[in-house]
Amino acid sequence: MKIGIFDSGIGGVTVFTEILKILPDEDYIYYSDSKNNPYGDKSDSEILSICDNIVKFLINNECKAIVIACNTASAKAAEHLRKKYKNLSIIAIEPAYKMVHDYAYSEPTLVMATKGTIESEKFQLLYKNYDNHQTELLPCVGLANIIEEDNKEEIEKYLNYNLKKYVGKVKNVVLGCTHYPLIQDEIKKVLGNVTFFNGAPNLAKHLKNILEKENLLEKGSGTIEFYDSQNSETKKERFIQIIDKTVN
């Protein structure tokens, strides 16, 4: 049996690498949905349908647990999927805003996320419960797509334009999209010495705890299968490069 992980593209690799660090012997399927990227521009009903089809694919490929490694999909579809697939463990990423409340409450904070994530009921509840009253919410429209395309020049232009008003004014940055940890260095280049908060390490620990609780931990061969909905070899190559660089 395998662990399935999916995202609207390769951004979820930042979640996957954290999982690999503590569960290296499990077998995995990673599903990159290039065909429907980005999710942040889609309606709730479209996201539900897309995610449901991916979950069916992963179940048909013998997945015992599924990780939603996309904040927009988590915010919009996780609850629906858990109700529909009651016997399947579905673990969903969410912005690490509570960590700011717990560890850096008194410091000014910037939440970077997709428009869909920030406007979602799930995030708004999280924000309301843990608001440190020094937080700016920045819907980064189009940024995930630029990162997905690995367009370094456009990334630099985007960050310089959209982050300039926060320079010297924020101490914490919540990376509310799994694509964004791929450009931490570029963000730091604009904002200076900020502290990043990312939900992936905690998700990895939570996944391990769930598998232990349900007696689903396995000593597999550590295989990784990569699927892309557009069969993109470029995405596959980049995915492998990030895995090798981060984990090996």
Image: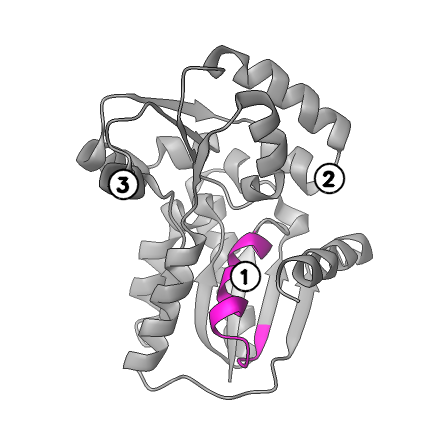
Q: Residues within 10 Å of mark 3 (few under 14, many from 20)?
A: few
Q: Position of residue 100 (x, y in %)?
A: 30, 37
- Residue drawn at x 44%, y 51% is 48
Q: Give me the C-alpha separation between circle 2 and circle 3.
A: 34 Å
Q: Residues within 10 Å of mark 1 (few under 14, many from 20)?
A: many
Answer whether residue 233 is visible to the viewer in this image: yes
In which quadrant of the rendered image does the C terminus lie?
Answer: bottom right
Amino acid found under the numbered disc labelled 2: Glu
Part of the protein shown in magenta = 12-28
Q: Which residue is mark 1?
A: 16
Q: Earlier in the sequence, mark 2 or mark 1?
A: 1
Q: Determine whether label 2 and label 3 are within 8 Å by CB.
A: no
Amino acid found under the numbered disc labelled 3: Tyr
Q: Position of residue 41 (x, y in %)?
A: 54, 34
User: Of all residues shown, which one is farthest toward the left?
Assistant: 129
Does 230 appear above or below 116? below
In the rendered image, residue 145 lying in the magenta stretch gets the answer no
Q: On the rendered structure, is 211 left or right of 105?
A: right
Q: Which residue is mark 2?
A: 149
